[in-house]
Image: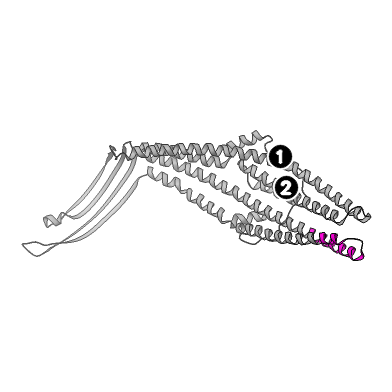
Amino acid sequence: MDIYQEALEKDAQYQSARAVYQAAQEKITQGRAGLLPSVNLSATRQTQEVDTTLGPPVTIQNRGIVISATQPLIRFENFIIYSQSKTQVSQAESQFVLAAQDLILRVAQAYFNVLDAQTDVEVAEAQKTAILKQLEQAQRNFEVGVATIVDTNEAQARFDLTLSQEIAARNALEISKRALQSIINRFPGQLASAHEISTELLSLPYISMDEWVAAAEAQNYMIKIQQAAYDLANKEVKKAWAQHYPTVDLVAQYSDQTGVGGAITGRGIDLTSKSIGLQLNLPLFQGFGTQSRVREAIANQEKAQHDLENTRRDMMLQVRQQYLNVTNGIAQVKALKQALVSSQTQLDSTMLGQEVGVRTEVDVLNAQQQFYSARRDLAKAYHGYLMSRLRLSAEAGELDEEVLKQINVMLQGN
């Protein structure tokens, strides 16, 4: 949870999504503007020098100020644009929630990648220590003549291989920490791992796969985003059709001018005018551009519909996969816990057999290798199960900090 809280403040991708969300909030104001009056002010001031054949040049001063106001009364296109702005804000909200869920998944995955890498390093170190002891013992046995050089060479080969594996594991740990650093903007130290791997299944809000699919169909944010895209495309068709319809505006204007006509008559006059009325505009022919835009909008609407269906199908597949990963993950963890116990028992028995002379150094090394592999596989399976639980919640549209806290409690072993 500490890493996640840092990511909320430091992750550039999440902060970018937040800025996009904040920018989208202005869409409603912009869309509403097409329904409200617009007021314009224009002012001019000119000095004209008029040459005459009967006398010296005449200087004419003129100035003018015009205030005009327009209130749309019937503009179908503007109503549709306003409706689209609401859909755009709703879509942006879903996109921001999806970004928040993605942050949880990225933080958790990066965190577990580090834990897996730490486990690989710990296993490599333990293997190196154990094999080094076996190598030293094999060398002593060879020196006193109770073992052959083959045992010594075998132990040496295992030791050299373990050294290379340790180097690779440490490199992988460094890389995984750098990946987490890109999220929290600092290099992480040693991360806490599970004190005790639990085999208790996290409480699930839905039991069956079909219930999870139904929840995802109603709540999945990718579907909500694509549904909004389809709604926008549908309204875009209506907006294109609206360009065929007439518009009616209420127009008012006030004009105050001096020196009007002075360039022609030689002496300007002052004019003040006020007007208010209705303005009708009926589009008759636009070079077939309107019909073309309608066809384009219909094609885009069809594309959005197919994209929505594709998103829904992909979501159903992902929910089923993650549900199986969760339900089978706990069974795998239980099996690997038992495998670890069995590997420990086998290792103890093999070491005892070596002491009484019925097992060789190679047998002990193989048993140790199996024990450390079982311990590593158990930790990775547990982390994989927890990630599947998070992804299942995300597909159902229910991934939030509360779900992450449940995972955090399991890591703490409380």
Above or below 186: residue 86: above
Disc 1 crowd rating (10 Å Cα; few below 14, some 14-19, many 20+) is some
Q: Is residue 386 magenta?
A: no
Does the image show residue 11? yes
Asked if one can make out residue 409 in the rendered structure from this viewpoint, the answer is no
Q: Is residue 67 above or below residue 205?
A: below
Three-letter code, disc 1: Thr
Residue shown at the point (61%, 60%) measured from the top left: 185
Viewer-closest of 258 and 388: 388
Residue 334 position within the rendered picture, expressed as x and y whole percent measured from the top left? 78, 43
Check disc 1 and report the residue beneath it.
Answer: 327
Mark 1, secondary structure of its residue: helix
Q: Residue at x 68, y 56 (%)?
A: 114
Prevailing SS of the magenta stretch: helix
- In the rendered image of this protein, does residue 320 appear above or below residue 258? above
Q: Nearer the viewer, residue 252 or 95?
A: 95
Residue 360 position within the rendered picture, expressed as x and y whole percent measured from the top left:
88, 55
Relative to residue 250, is residue 343 drawn left or right? right
Mark nearer the viewer, 1 or 2: 2
Residue found at the very far front of the displayed protein:
149
Q: Residue 88: give its label.
A: none
Instruction: Identify which amino acid the numbered label 2 is placed on.
Output: Ala
From this viewpoint, which residue is outermost toward the right?
356
**Residue range corresponding to the magenta coloring:** 126-155
Q: Is residue 330 left or right of residue 36?
A: right
Q: Position of residue 69 (x, y in %)?
A: 31, 46
User: In the drawing, does residue 205 fall left or right of residue 53?
Assistant: right
Quadrant in the rendering for residue 154? bottom right
Label of residue 381 in the image: 2
